[in-house]
Amino acid sequence: MKKIDIEELYWIDWNEISRKPEELNEIFAYIRDYDSRNIEELGKILKLYSNPSGEFTIEFAKIAGEIYKNDKIKFIKALNLVRDEAINLVYVFRMEKIFEDEDKEYTEVLSSNQLTEEEIDTTYTFFKMYKTICAT
């Protein structure tokens, strides 16, 4: 599989790509290879939910949830790089019912002792937004 520039995927015309099933499947397979993605690439993947075409939001929502479930610390580190996406991802997590117990999840992430102070702040903000939005 050829290397795909994830940042460029944000700007592509997803409607046009959807007419090319082979190419679309290749892109999604590439994106879903989370273990081989570095933190910067994961951050770019998280942004795809808000792509200007507004296409494949359900698929990108599921991918964001899968990234979190696959590695919570990597997710937080990637989210820290794209903090402006936090509010969108809070809605994704609510819609996809990612958390069974957000307090437990929050404690688990913080107790990893793998986050910088900035990443801890991002974690706090993300979980606080989640709690606020889900309380309404």
Image: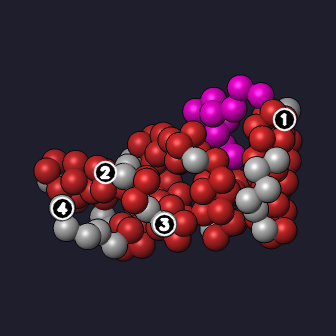
Q: Does 100 appear in magenta?
A: yes
What span is in magenta? 90-101
Mark 2 or mark 3: whose residue is earlier in sequence: 2
Say what amino acid the circle numbered 3 marks: Asn
The residue tagged with tag 3: helix, strand or loop? loop
Q: Please, what is the three-letter code of the amino acid marked with disc 4?
A: Met
Mark 2 or mark 1, earlier in chain:
2
Identify the residue at image location x=22%, y=48%. Answer: 25
Residue beneath the point at 16% across and 48% down:
21
- Which of 8/18 is in front? 8
Q: Secondary structure at mark 4?
A: loop
Question: Looking at the image, is mark 3 or mark 1 earlier in the sequence?
Answer: 3
The kind of residue on which mark 2 rests is Phe
- Give the labeled residue for mark 4: 1
User: What is the crowding at mark 3: few (fewer than 14 residues within 10 Å), some, or many (at least 20)?
Assistant: few
Picture quarter with the C terminus: top right
Residue 4 image position (x, y, % from top left): 29, 69
Mark 4–mark 1 CB contact (< 8 Å): no
Find the residue positioned furthest to the top: 100
Residue occupying image coordinates x 71% and y 26%: 100
Please tell me whether mark 1 sits on a helix, a strand or a loop.
helix
Q: Determine which residue is flagged by label 2.
A: 28
Label 1 neighbour load within 10 Å: few <14, some 14-19, many 20+:
few
Amino acid, disc 1 = Asp
Q: Residues within 10 Å of mark 4 (few under 14, many from 20)?
A: few
Task: Please tell me whether residue 109 is drawn above or below residue 47 in the rendered image.
Answer: above
Q: What residue occupies the far front of the structure in this picture? A: 113
**Foreground label between 3 and 1:** 3
Element assignment for label 2: helix
Q: Which residue is mark 1?
A: 103
